[in-house]
């Protein structure tokens, strides 16, 4: 067990999310926590007594768990930035109401891109594993991925990559090239699957990452253009972290939708 490390969920009071969270926690408990009993932290904007009871019933009795409030608000941008931020986006010419374009989703993108490290809670966390409500560990994990991070002196551990859609990464690569130029070629639309990661919080709290994040944050483009944490993390890590400090985590994992097998 790696001291001062935890598993982190950002939870949302919605029936679909909570149904999936219950499945995620059941699989996590059986396939991971039974062997590696790390504490679990639930970030939230407000959590009902019913949700607290659900989580308490699903998690093993010996697991420490904590609820940590997150206050999502727009940063104190100048008016010149604020007036550019749309409440909703147009996607292929029509207004899109799904979560991937909402203000709440953009708050989440900013949080996982770096604003979480402005919260003093994370000053005491060494390594953090992020899971979504619909993150599922499918079978028994035999090797502690936190310990793998320590053994390899890794800064970032990921499970997969994908190519993001052009409309939501417009200008990101060029912006990053200006603030953190590198010799190597970095694919403009590549992104990490950030529904699961393990990261070294000491490094992400450092000025090296936080200065990069601050420049992106001050542009307002997380809200204006919906730059997501997945491509932001990819662009930043590729530019600021040596390749040997970025590792792929081998874990039986699935993301997305409802999952019932093995429950």
Image (cartoon, rainbow, N blue to C red):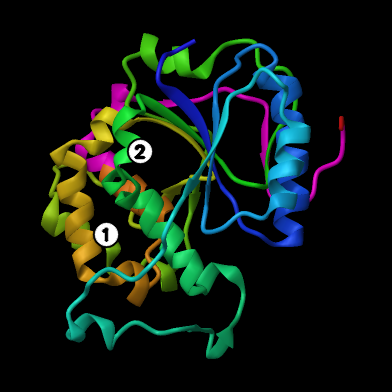
Residue at the spot 87% in from the left edge and 30% down from the top edge: 262
Quadrant the C terminus occupies = top right
List the residue tagged with mark 2. Answer: 121
Q: Residues within 10 Å of mark 1 (few under 14, many from 20)?
A: some
Q: Determine the CA span between mark 2 and mark 1.
A: 31 Å
In this rendering, is residue 120 above or below 95? above
Residue at the spot 24% in from the left edge and 31% down from the top edge: 203
List the residue tagged with mark 1. Answer: 173
Contact (Cβ within 8 Å) of mark 2 with mark 1: no
- Residue 52, visible in the rendered structure: yes
Q: Which residues are magenta?
A: 237-261
As for residue 255 lying within the magenta part, the answer is yes
**With 194 as the anchor, is 220 left or right in this view?**
left
Expressed as whole percent of the image width and height from the top left, the position of residue 61 reads: 71, 21
Q: Residues within 10 Å of mark 2 (few under 14, many from 20)?
A: few
Residue at the spot 63% in from the left edge and 22% down from the top edge: 63
**With 130 as the anchor, is 260 left or right in this view?**
right
Expressed as whole percent of the image width and height from the top left, the position of residue 168 reads: 42, 69
- Among the two numbered marks 2 and 1 on one chain, the one whose residue lies closer to the N terminus: 2
As for residue 102 lying within the magenta part, the answer is no
In this rendering, is residue 129 above or below 73? above
Query: What secondary structure is marked by label 1?
Result: helix
Looking at the image, is mark 2 or mark 1 nearer the viewer?
Answer: 2
**With 208 as the anchor, is 112 left or right in this view?**
right
């Amino acid at each position: 067990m790696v001291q001062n490390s935890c598993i982190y969920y950002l939870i949302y009071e919605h029936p679909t999310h909570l149904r999936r969270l219950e499945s995620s926690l059941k699989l996590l408990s059986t396939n991971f926590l039974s062997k590696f009993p790390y504490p679990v932290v639930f970030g939230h904007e407000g959590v009902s007594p019913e949700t607290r009871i659900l989580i308490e019933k699903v998690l093993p009795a010996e697991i420490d768990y904590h609820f940590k409030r997150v206050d999502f608000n727009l940063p104190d941008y100048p008016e010149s930035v604020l007036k550019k931020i749309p409440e909703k986006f147009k996607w292929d010419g029509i207004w899109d109401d799904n979560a991937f374009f909402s203000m709440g989703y953009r708050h989440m993108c900013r949080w996982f891109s770096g604003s979480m490290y402005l919260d003093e809670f994370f000053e005491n966390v060494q390594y953090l594993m992020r899971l979504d409500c619909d993150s599922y560990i499918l079978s028994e994990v035999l090797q502690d991925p936190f310990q793998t991070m320590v053994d390899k002196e890794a800064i970032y551990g990921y499970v997969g990559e994908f190519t993001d859609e052009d409309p939501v990464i417009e200008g990101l690569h060029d912006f990053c090239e200006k603030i953190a130029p590198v010799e190597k070629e970095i694919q403009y639309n590549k992104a990490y699957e950030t529904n699961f990661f393990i990261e070294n919080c000491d490094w992400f709290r450092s000025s090296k990452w936080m200065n990069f994040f601050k420049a992106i944050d001050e542009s307002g483009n997380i809200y204006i253009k919906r730059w997501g944490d997945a491509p932001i993390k990819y662009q930043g890590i590729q530019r600021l972290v040596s390749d040997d400090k970025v590792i792929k985590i081998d874990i039986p994992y699935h993301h997305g939708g409802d999952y019932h097998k093995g429950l």
